[in-house]
Image (spheres, rainbow, N blue to C red):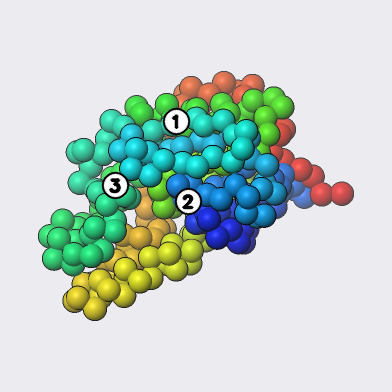
Amino acid sequence: MPAIPAASVANLRDLGGLPLGDGRSVRPGLVLRSAQLDRLDPDEAAVAALGVRTVVDLRTETERADRPDRLPPGARPVVADVLADHLAGSGLPPAARLKTLLTDPALAEEHLGGGRVRAAFARTYRTFVSGESARAAYRSLLTELGTPGAGPLLFHCTAGKDRTGWAATVVLTLLGADEETVRAEYLAVNPAVRVAFAPMIEGFTAQGGDPELALDLIGVVPEYLEAALDEVAVRHGSMETYVREGLGVPDEVTALIRERLTVTSA
């Protein structure tokens, strides 16, 4: 789906309207994704119109402390820290440090050059599936989505591309989206993040930095998603089993998610 044109929230998107096959699609207005909400203007028309009731924050404690969310009026915050038990040993800097790396090409090359950035992201994506804190975080998100009578929910991380991208993949796959739809939605954030980081990318390359390294840092590529999907296949065999056994989400909650978030065309 096209990005929602909000000036105070980057990468804001509604999963509603995405096709699910058999004449079905994702119900609009109930499940949204974005980057962090530290600059959110609740009075901005595009934001106010969403009526968000729950905000699931997938960021680390440090990220939350550095850039606290500004919540829409009446919205309930839910902390679901995906990387709580992983970040220190991952070899991958938190999204909040991307700006530091993009101002220092030598540091970026030292830590993540020579293809190491893609390998580090792939390892982290596998942790989205198998890490203890990640499983608890994505279980919390699905539990919120499967709550009867819940209103619109927005989930986000810092840049709104990796932890958030995997969350969207899980939700869409559960609802029955095909591989092409899931992949297209995952990659659709790239234009927004490239615009957001454009001045830094230009400065990085002007200082002699590798533009491909910069794009791998601030964007997403298919192999990141493929690493997580492979982890699901190896450990659980299917997304359904991953959600049921890996995340511990009961079948009745999954059924409620499908009922709430699916609409059939007339």
As drawn, 191 above or below 262: below
241 relative to 60 in the view: left or right: right
244 relative to 2 in the view: left or right: left
* Local crowd size for mark 3, using a 10 Å CA cut-off: few (<14), some (14–19), many (≥20): some
For the residue pair 245 and 150, the one nearer the viewer reads as 150
Tell me which numbered mark, 1 or 3, is placed earlier along the sequence.
1
Tell me which numbered mark, 2 or 3, is placed earlier along the sequence.
2
Which of discs 2 and 3 lies nearer the camera? The answer is 2
| The image quarter in which residue 173 lies | top right
Furthest residue toward right: 266
What residue did someone put label 3 on?
94
Query: Residue 79, labelled with which disc?
Result: 1
Asked if the residue under mark 2 is in contact with the one under mark 1, i.e. CB atoms within 8 Å, the reply is no
For the residue pair 85 and 173, the one nearer the viewer reads as 85
Q: How many marks?
A: 3
Q: What residue type is disc 3 on?
A: Pro
| The image quarter in which residue 163 lies | top left
Q: Secondary structure at mark 1?
A: strand
Residue at the image point whose x is 60% and y is 47% from the top:
42
Which of discs 1 and 2 lies nearer the camera? The answer is 2
As drawn, 67 above or below 141: below
Residue 31 in view, yes or no: yes
Q: CA distance from mark 1 to mark 3?
A: 17 Å
What residue did someone put label 2 on?
39
Residue at the image point whose x is 39% and y is 61% from the top:
219
